[in-house]
Image (cartoon, helix red, strand yellow):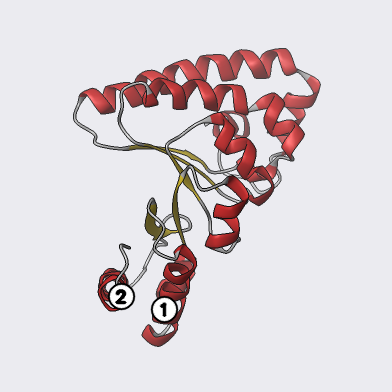
Amino acid sequence: MASYIIEGGSTREFLKTKTMMYSDPQTWHALMEKLSGVLSDYLLAQIRAGAQAVQVFDSWVGALNAADYLEFVQPYSRRILQAAQETGVPVIHFGTGTTTLLPAMKAAGGTVLGLDWRIPLDEGWDLVGQDVAIQGNLDPALLFAPLPEIKKRVHDILRRAAGRPGHIFNLGHGILQHTPVENVKAVVDMVHEFSITEGVMA
């Protein structure tokens, strides 16, 4: 949210955002304080309206190194996540490009940690420990692949999960425009098929 406000739209370099962080940290922290309060209220409103689970989606956090994440982002993510967790509703904490940030993201909070497709599911889970649920992590682009290739990748993820409790099968990012709906339905069937034939909960 902060990057969209500062950049005025999407970006790959986050030059304006990082420039503010480094050159005017007082303004950055004032903005993040305001945003974390508003977003906490927004999540709580969703929960009061009946949401059975909520997700905090940090689409650009992977642009930071671990030290900058700890200083400029983690305190505000923690505020939002903890406000939602206090309601007892499951809270998913997800970012992209976050392999180097996963332990710090876990420390920020959330009952479920989302993994993007850049890290094998079992390696990501080992990195953060078995005391947190994991969501992920099929590459959304694979939904355009032939069904045999999709099935191979789906089953690989489920084998890496190894039947451990707390795995939510999902994409490792948002669904892409023009994704074939029939392939999405096929993935659902593949997950169910695997859980039956392998005798595990998927």
* The C terminus lies in quadrant: bottom left
Label ID, residue 81 = none
Q: Amino acid at mark 2?
A: Met
Report the label total: 2
Cβ atoms under marks 2 and 1 closer than 8 Å: yes
The residue beneath circle 2 is 190
Image point (47%, 55%), residue name: 173
Find the residue positioned furthest to the right.
23
Vertical order, 7 against 166 (above or below):
above
Which percent across, then down, holds residue 23?
80, 22
Which percent across, then down, holds residue 157?
46, 68
Vertical order, 1 against 135 (above or below):
above
The residue beneath circle 1 is 150
103 and 3: which one is in front? 103
On the image, which quarter does residue 26 sit in? top right
70 and 163: which one is in front? 163
Horizontal side, residue 163 vs residue 132: left or right: left
Which percent across, then down, holds residue 62?
64, 45
Vertical order, 9 against 157 (above or below):
above
Is there any visible trace of residue 138 in the rendered image? no
Vertical order, 141 against 129 (above or below):
below
Mark 2 vs mark 1, CA separation in Å: 9 Å
Horizontal side, residue 73 vs residue 185: left or right: right
In front: mark 2 or mark 1? Answer: 2
Horizontal side, residue 170 vs residue 124: left or right: left
On the image, which quarter does residue 25 sit in? top right
Is there any visible trace of residue 23 in the rendered image? yes
Image point (29%, 72%), residue name: 199
Image point (42%, 62%), residue name: 176
